[in-house]
Image: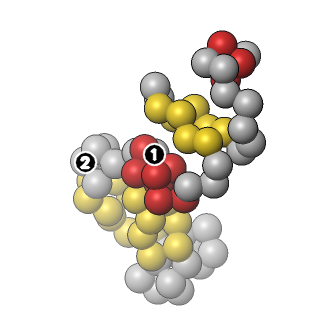
């Protein structure tokens, strides 16, 4: 409904906060999303963690390694 209200008809279309991304512009989408991608120190699995949350404990979904990440 929000995309229709803004007269956006292209697909894919993403509404991230107040910003709209039409088309699959991965770089722009990742800049707008408040996370970063980290790599597990043990198995190298990539995962996303939120930004601006201080130091958080992260558990790798692949190997169950638990480690602290400063965000």
Tell me residue 49's x, y (percent). Answer: 44, 56
Residue sitting at 53 percent across and 86 percent down? 43
Q: Is 51 left or right of 5, judged from the image as shown?
A: left
Between 35 and 1, which is closer to the camera in this rendering?
1
Q: Is 71 left or right of 16, judged from the image as shown?
A: left
- Kind of element beneath mark 1: loop
Between 12 and 59, which is closer to the camera in this rendering?
12
Between 1 and 36, which is closer to the camera in this rendering?
1
Q: Which corner quadrant holds the N terminus? A: top right
The colouring scheme, among rainbow, by chain, secondary structure or one colour, is: secondary structure
Q: Is residue 64 visible?
A: yes
Does 27 sit above or below residue 42? Answer: above
Residue sitting at 71 percent across and 18 percent down? 4
Tell me residue 59's x, y (percent). Answer: 50, 64
Between 28 and 57, which is closer to the camera in this rendering?
28
Q: Is residue 50 visible?
A: no
Of labels 1 and 2, earlier in sequence is 1
- Which is closer to the viewer, label 1 or label 2? 1
The single residue placed furthest to the top in the displayed view is: 5
State yes or no: discs 1 and 2 in contact (Cβ < 8 Å).
no
Few, some or many C-alpha atoms within 10 Å of disc 1 (few <14, some 14-19, many ≥20)? few
Mark 1 → mark 2, Cα distance in angstroms: 17 Å
Tell me residue 18's x, y (percent). Answer: 46, 25
- Kind of element beneath mark 2: loop
* Disc marking residue 1: none
Few, some or many C-alpha atoms within 10 Å of disc 2 (few <14, some 14-19, many ≥20)? few
The residue under label 1 is: 33
Does 8 sit above or below residue 11? Answer: above
Q: Quadrant of residue 12?
A: top right
The residue under label 2 is: 54
Residue sitting at 72 percent across and 38 percent down? 10
Tell me residue 14's x, y (percent). Answer: 62, 38
């Amino acid at each position: 409904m929000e995309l229709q209200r803004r007269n956006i008809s292209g697909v894919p279309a993403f509404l991230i906060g107040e910003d709209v991304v039409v088309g699959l512009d991965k770089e722009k989408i990742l800049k707008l999303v408040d996370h970063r991608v980290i790599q597990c120190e043990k198995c190298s699995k990539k995962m996303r963690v939120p930004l601006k949350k201080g130091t958080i404990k992260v558990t790798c979904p692949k190997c169950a390694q638990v480690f602290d990440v400063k965000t």
